[in-house]
């Protein structure tokens, strides 16, 4: 019985790790496929929400919290200043 429980925990951890490390496009496609399967309504709703969600990381949403009018990081050109060191 203990071996079965440990095996289930290890399998659940492996599935979770694969889900988290999977590319976002694969995750959305997998969630869409699972949402179409024969699942209870609570799981189906969760997979439908996951299939339409935006990725949690990446460069497309990191600066979404900046108010309008405030320049985003890296936006526009900035001058480069060279400072000459005096000889000793």
Image (spheres, rainbow, N blue to C red):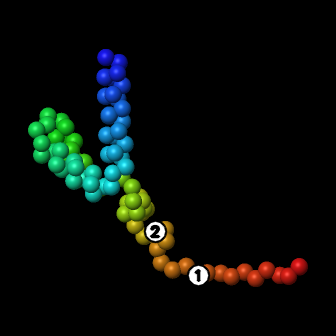
Near mark 2 (Cα within 10 A), the count class, few <14, some 14-19 or many ≥20, is few
Task: Locate residue 4: give its quadrant.
Answer: top left
Residue farthest to the right? 88
User: For the C terminus, which image quadrant?
Assistant: bottom right
The structure residue drawn at horizontal position 46% and vertical position 70%, both measured from the top left corner, is 71
Camera-side residue: 79 or 26?
A: 26
Residue farthest to the front? 3
Mark 2 vs 1, N-terminal side? 2
* Residue 13 appearing in the image: yes
Q: Secondary structure at mark 1?
A: loop
- The x, y position of residue 85, in whole percent, is 79, 80
Task: Locate residue 61: give its quadrant.
Answer: bottom left
Residue assigned mark 1: 79
Task: Locate residue 35: give its quadrant.
Answer: top left
The structure residue drawn at horizontal position 17% and vertical position 44%, both measured from the top left corner, is 34
Q: Going by the image, does 71 lie left or right of 16?
A: right
The structure residue drawn at horizontal position 42% and vertical position 70%, both measured from the top left corner, is 69
Count of numbered circles on the image: 2
Near mark 1 (Cα within 10 A), the count class, few <14, some 14-19 or many ≥20, is few
User: For the N terminus, which image quadrant?
Assistant: top left
Residue assigned mark 2: 72
- The x, y position of residue 41, in whole percent, is 14, 36
- The x, y position of residue 46, in whole percent, is 22, 42
Circles 2, 1 touching at the beta carbon (< 8 Å): no
Q: Going by the image, does 21 lie left or right of 75?
A: left
- The x, y position of residue 67, in whole percent, is 42, 63
Q: CA distance from mark 2 to mark 1?
A: 16 Å
Question: Measured along the vertical axis of the image, is residue 51 above or below residue 86?
Answer: above
């Amino acid at each position: 019985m203990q071996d079965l429980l440990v095996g289930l925990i290890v399998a659940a951890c492996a599935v979770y790790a694969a889900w988290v490390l999977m590319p976002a496009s694969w995750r959305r496609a997998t969630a869409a496929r699972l949402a179409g399967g024969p699942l209870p309504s609570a799981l189906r709703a969760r997979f439908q929400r996951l299939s339409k969600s935006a990725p949690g990381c990446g460069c497309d949403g990191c600066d979404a919290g900046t108010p309008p009018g405030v320049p985003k990081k890296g936006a526009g050109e900035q001058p480069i200043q060279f400072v000459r060191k005096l000889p000793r």
